[in-house]
């Protein structure tokens, strides 16, 4: 777990300009819209509408930057150079398949939560690798969900632990970034909030990078196991 955490943080920092450009392709205009509505259209009591809008933006447009991010990390693992246009082209190409698979995963998770079949956090961990699977293995829908369940088997505590550590760091940074607006009201402007939200969106990307690295490690381990099995069969 710690090896992947260290690699994720290092890779995120090393490729920060590229990852920032990819993530903010969706979230800079998204944050501008959300904060414009918050400051000039909606009232302070309409925070639920802001949350719904954030969910809609992530749900509809998120697959674009997620697909691009997955491809960029994969290129790094393969030792290949990748440009912003190349990564975004892959994100756009895989938008429909990623959207459909993520929608299915969300729907199944919601249904099972309603029926109290499986705790939601368990399903979130099982499906943590679907973005990488859709983009890198050309697998969609239930096949991608089954593949993610297969690859996370035996690694779910590691995935949960890594995501928890990174999320705690993200929450701590969120608190630090927004604290000044509570101390000095003059900082609570649309411009400050757009910048703060965008910085946090980029920081959150390290969690998504870590999930791609977990996929890569699981795939390599599975391939190594098959080779060992074939060698044992020959002997």
Image: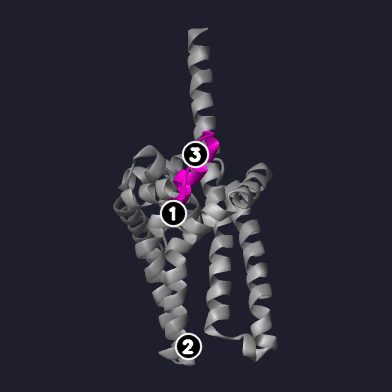
Query: Does 216 lie within the magenta span?
Result: no
Q: CA distance from mark 3 to mark 2?
A: 40 Å
In the displayed structure, would residue 40 be above or below residue 140? below
Mark 1 Cα shell of 10 Å, populated few (<14), some (14-19), many (≥20): many
The disc at residue 39 is 2
Which region is colored magenta? 69-84
The disc at residue 66 is 1
| Residue in view at x 51 percent, y 44 percent | 73
Q: Position of residue 37 (x, y in %)?
A: 42, 84
Along the viewing direction, whichever of 198 and 178 lies nearer the viewer: 198
Q: Position of residue 95 (x, y in %)?
A: 33, 53
Which residue is labeled 3 in the image? Answer: 75
| Residue in view at x 46 percent, y 67 percent | 27
Task: Residue 165: name its quadrant.
Answer: bottom right
Along the viewing direction, whichever of 26 and 163 lies nearer the viewer: 26
Q: Is residue 19 visible?
A: yes
């Amino acid at each position: 777990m710690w090896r992947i955490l260290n690699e994720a943080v290092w890779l995120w920092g090393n490729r920060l300009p590229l990852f920032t450009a990819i993530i903010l392709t969706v979230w800079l205009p998204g944050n501008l819209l959300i904060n414009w509505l918050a400051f000039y259209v909606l009232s302070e009591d309409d925070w639920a509408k802001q949350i719904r809008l954030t969910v809609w933006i992530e749900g509809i447009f998120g697959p674009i930057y997620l697909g691009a991010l997955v491809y960029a990390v994969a290129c790094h693992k393969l030792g290949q150079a990748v440009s912003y246009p190349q990564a975004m082209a892959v994100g756009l190409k895989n938008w429909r398949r990623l959207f459909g698979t993520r929608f299915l995963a969300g729907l199944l998770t919601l249904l099972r939560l309603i029926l109290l079949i499986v705790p939601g956090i368990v399903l979130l961990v099982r499906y943590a690798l679907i973005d990488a699977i859709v983009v890198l293995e050309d697998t969609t829908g239930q096949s991608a969900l089954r593949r993610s369940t297969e690859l996370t088997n035996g690694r779910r505590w590691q995935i949960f632990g890594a995501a928890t550590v990174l999320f705690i760091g993200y929450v701590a940074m969120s608190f630090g970034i927004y604290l000044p607006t509570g101390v000095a009201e003059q900082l609570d402007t649309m411009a400050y909030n757009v910048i703060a939200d965008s910085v946090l969106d980029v920081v959150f990307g390290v969690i998504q990078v870590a999930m791609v690295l977990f996929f890569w490690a699981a795939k390599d381990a599975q391939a190594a196991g098959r080779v060992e099995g074939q060698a044992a069969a020959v002997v």
